[in-house]
Amino acid sequence: MVDVIVVGAGLAGLVAARELRSAGLSMQVIEAAPAVGGRMLRAPLKPERGLRSPEGGPAWVDLGGQWVGPSHSRVLALLEAHGLRRFPSPHEGQSVLSFGSRRCTFSGFFQGFPEGLPPSLPARDWDDAMAALKQFQALVASLPAGHPHHHPDAAALDRLSFQDWIDAHTHTPFAAWYFAYFCRAVGFLGPAEPDQVSLLHVAWGQRTAPQAEHPEEELIHGGAGQLPPLLAADLGEALMLGEPVRAIHQPDAPLRDAGDGGGDVQVITDRATYAGRAAIVAMPPAMAARIRFTPTLPADRLALQEGMAMGACSKVLVAYGRPWWREAGLSGVGIGDRPWVELCADSSDPETGLGVIAAFVVGRRRERWSALGAEQRRAAVLEDLAAYFGPAALEPLDYVEKDWPRESFVGGAFAGWMPPGLWTRSGDALLRPHGRVFWAGTESAERWPGFFEGAVSSGERAAADVAALLA
Ligand SMILES: Cc1cc2nc3c(=O)[nH]c(=O)nc-3n(C[C@H](O)[C@H](O)[C@H](O)COP(=O)(O)OP(=O)(O)OC[C@H]3O[C@@H](n4cnc5c(N)ncnc54)[C@H](O)[C@@H]3O)c2cc1C
C-alpha cells in the first residue's frame, strides 16, 4: 500500500511523482512501455558513419518533442536543474515556400506567416491570406486563456469545424491551404485535418499556446529525450516498467463527489494489483480509454476518452555530414503543399557540426505515407526535401523515422485534439477527478496543452490536488 499510484511515466507522470515525493508522500509509478518518456524520446544516429557527438559517442536526435520556448518556464527550469543545455533553433537565411508549381524563398521561421509577400506569390493570394489572418487573430483574442468551453461563444464555435471557418474566410487556394497547413503541422493540439477538428479547439489552441510566443525558439544539446530518464533516475523500485495498467478499481467508493471517493484505489496489471490511497492517470484521454474503471466513468468522461483522437504525425530525422543548405543561403525551413512533407526545419546541433533536418508527415498525408513500404517512405521524404533545398538532400548519411500513431501506448502525436462538439459536451471531464483517481497529461493543461510545458504543469497540478486530498 502506497499513498499514490502514478500510471504513466511520460513527462507528466514523472513530474507528478517528483512533486508527490517532495510532499512527503509514498508512491509507485507504473509504465506500460519498457522505458520512461512517452512522447519525449531520443535515438542515436549511426556513429559508424561519422555521426558523432563532440564526446565521441553517437549524435542524438529527438523522435518526439524537441523545441522549447521562452515562456516554457517550468520546462526550462527542469532542463537547467538537470544540466541540459540549450541552443537557438538555427534559422538564419531564407526559408522555402513551395505552393503548386511555385517555389520561392522568404524571411522568417515557420511559426506564422512569412514576413511580407514572398516573391512570385500573386498579391491577390497573399492579401486574401492576410485578411483571413486578421479575422482569425480577432477570434483567437476573444477567447479565454483557460479551458474555453464555458465562454459565451463556445457552443457556437464548437459546432463548426476549422474547415467551415476556412471555407467562409478564404477565397484563394493559397489562403485555404495555408490555414489547413497551419492546423495540420504547426504547434496546435493535433495535428488534425481542418475538417476533423473543432473551430473552438483550433482558435483556443492559439490563444493558450500561441506561436507568437515562439515555442520553437530553442533546442537541447543531445536531445530533449534525455530528460525523462534523468527525472526517473532516483525512483528505484518505485518505478515499474513494461507493465500496462488494465483496470483501476475503487471498491469502497460511492463516488458521490469528485475527489472524495473514500477507501483505496486498486491498480491492476497483468502481473500484480497495486493498492494506494489515490491514483494519478498521466496519459492522453485516448490512452486512458483502454483502462477499465470500476465504478464506471461518467458519460462525459467516456465521451472525452472515445472522442479526443490523437494527432496523425510521423517525424523523420534526416542527417548529413554538414548543414549544406546554409551554403546556398537557406535556413533549412521548408513549408509547402508537397505530396508528403508540409513542414521541415533545421535541427542541427552546432556542437556536432552535422546537418539534421526534422521533417513532419501529418494528417491524411501520413495515412497514405505509412501504408507505403520502408524504401518508398524514405524516397518520398527525400524527394520532398530535395524539392525544398536541392538534390544534395537525396544523399543523407542517416535516416530515422517514427510513426507515432503506431506506438501502442502513445497512439499518436503531437497530442490529442477535439472534434466539433466535444469541448461543449466533455470539457469539464478533462480535469474532474473520478473519486480518488486524478488526471494528468499535456492534453489536460490549461496553458501550453500539447507541449512539454503543459505536461509539466498538469503533473504539478494533479500532484497538488492529490496531496491536498490526502493531507
Ligand atoms: C513528434 C512529436 C513532436 C513534438 N514536438 C514538441 C516540441 O517540439 N515541443 C514540445 O513542447 N512538445 C512537443 N511534443 C509534445 C510533447 O512531447 C508532449 O506534450 C509530452 O511529452 C507529453 O507528455 P505526457 O506525459 O503528457 O504524455 P506521454 O508522453 O504520452 O506519456 C504517457 C505515458 O503513459 C504510458 N501509458 C499509456 N497507457 C498506459 C497504461 N495502460 N499503463 C501504464 N502506462 C501507460 C505511455 O507509455 C507513456 O509513457 C511533440 C510530440 C511528438 C510525439
Image: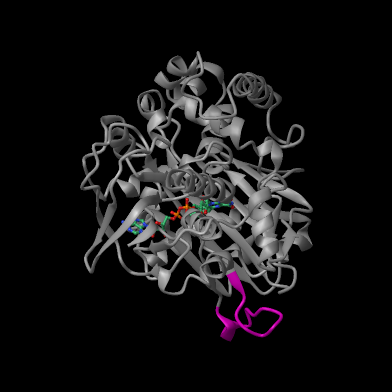
Question: Which x, y percent locates residue 27?
Answer: 42, 61
Question: Which x, y percent locates residue 70?
Answer: 72, 47
**Residue 86 lies in quadrant:** bottom right
Q: Which residues are magenta?
A: 46-60
Along the viewing direction, whichever of 403 and 331 lies nearer the viewer: 403
Residue shown at 58% from the left, 30% from the top:
174
Please, what is the dominant secondary structure of the magenta stretch?
loop
Residue shown at 39% from the left, 35% from the top:
432
The answer to whether 12 is drawn above or below residue 374 in the figure is above
Along the viewing direction, whichever of 64 and 265 lies nearer the viewer: 265
- Evaluate whether residue 311 shows in this view: no
Along the viewing direction, whichever of 256 and 327 lies nearer the viewer: 256
Determine if the magenta segment contains residue 327: no
Is 308 positioned to the left or the right of 441 in the image?
left
Question: Which x, y percent locates residue 442?
Answer: 49, 46
Is 305 positioned to the left or the right of 208 in the image?
left
